[in-house]
Image (spheres, grey):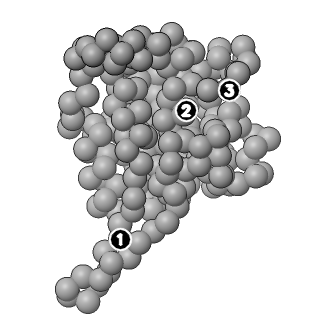
Amino acid sequence: MRRISRQLLARARRIKLLLMDVDGVLTDGSIYFLPRPDGGMFETKGFDCRDGLGIRLAHHAGIKTGIITGRSSPVIEARAKELGIHFLQQHALEKIEPYERIRHAAQMRDEEVCYVGDDIVDLPLLKRVGLAVCVGDGDEFLRRHVHYWTRRPGGAGAVREAIELILTAQGKWDGILKSYLRGDRAINLRRTDETS
C-alpha cells in the first residue's frame, strides 16, 4: 500500500461502517443480460473474490458493511447474503435517504462511516461521510471530492484496498497477516445471514 497521510489515517481509524455501491465498485460496471427459457431476460454480474475476502476480514475485525445501489437484482441480494453484509438497500437512485436509514440502524455518526463509490451519483454521499473513497477507474470529477482514490479499479480489488487502508489505520491488518503466516485458524470467515 502506498504511503498515506496522517489525516487520512485519522479518518480511517474512526470507521466502524463500510458502505459500498455495486456497479463499478463491487463489479467492473458490466451488466450481463441472459435469456430466460420463457423469453424474458435475467440480469447477472461478476464479483471479485478478493473484495469478498476483504469484506469477510472487515467483519472479523468488527466493521459492519452495507450496500446502497441504484439498481435492483437478485444476484446482488444473493452476494450480500453470501458475504454476510449487514445492510442492503437496492433501487436507491437517491442515496442520502437510504444512507440515513442504515446509519440510524447501525447507530453510527457520519465520521464513523466510509463509502466507496465510482460516479457522480455517489457525490452527495461521498461529501457526507467520514472517509470518502473512489475506485481507481471512477469518474475523474470525484478525485477532488474524496479522501482516497484507490489504485485498483472497481470490481478488481478496490473495495479490498479500502478495507486494508481502514484495518491498517486501526492497527488490525498486521495481526491478520501474521495469523495467516502462522497458519492459525483463528480467523472465522464463516458465512452469516445477518443481511437486513
Element marked by disc 2:
helix
194 or 31, nearer to the observer: 31
In percent of the image, x 31 and y 11: which residue is there? 182
Image x and y of residue 127, in percent: 69, 38
Q: Are marks 2 and 3 in contact (CB under 8 Å)?
A: no
Instruction: Kindly report the distance in space between the C-alpha atoms of the residues bearing marks 2 and 3.
Output: 12 Å
Tell me if residue 39 comes above or below residue 67 in the rendering: below
Element marked by disc 3:
loop
Q: Which amino acid does label 1 sit on?
A: Glu
Instruction: Kindly report the distance in space between the C-alpha atoms of the residues bearing marks 1 and 2.
Output: 27 Å
Image x and y of residue 167, in percent: 49, 19
- Nearer the observer, disc 2 or disc 3? 3
Tell me if residue 157 comes above or below residue 44 in the rendering: above
In percent of the image, x 47 and y 17: which residue is there? 173
In percent of the image, x 40 and y 26: which residue is there? 58
- Nearer the observer, disc 1 or disc 2? 2
In percent of the image, x 19 and y 86: which residue is there? 37
Return the disc, 2 or 3, that comes first in the chain's sequence.
3
Instruction: Kindly report the distance in space between the C-alpha atoms of the residues bearing marks 1 and 3.
Output: 36 Å
- Nearer the observer, disc 1 or disc 3? 3
Tell me if residue 192 comes above or below residue 34 in the rendering: above
Sort mark 3 into few (<14), some (14-19) or many (20+) by Cα contacts within 10 Å: few
Image x and y of residue 90, in percent: 40, 55
How many numbered circles are shown? 3
Q: Which quarter shows the N terminus? A: top right
Seen from this angle, which residue lies furthest bottom?
39
Task: Give the labeled residue for mark 2.
Answer: 162
Q: Do the residues labelled 1 and 3 touch (CB within 8 Å)?
A: no
> Residue 2: which disc?
3
Image x and y of residue 117, in percent: 59, 46
Return the disc, 1 or 3, that comes first in the chain's sequence.
3
Task: Give the labeled residue for mark 1.
Answer: 43
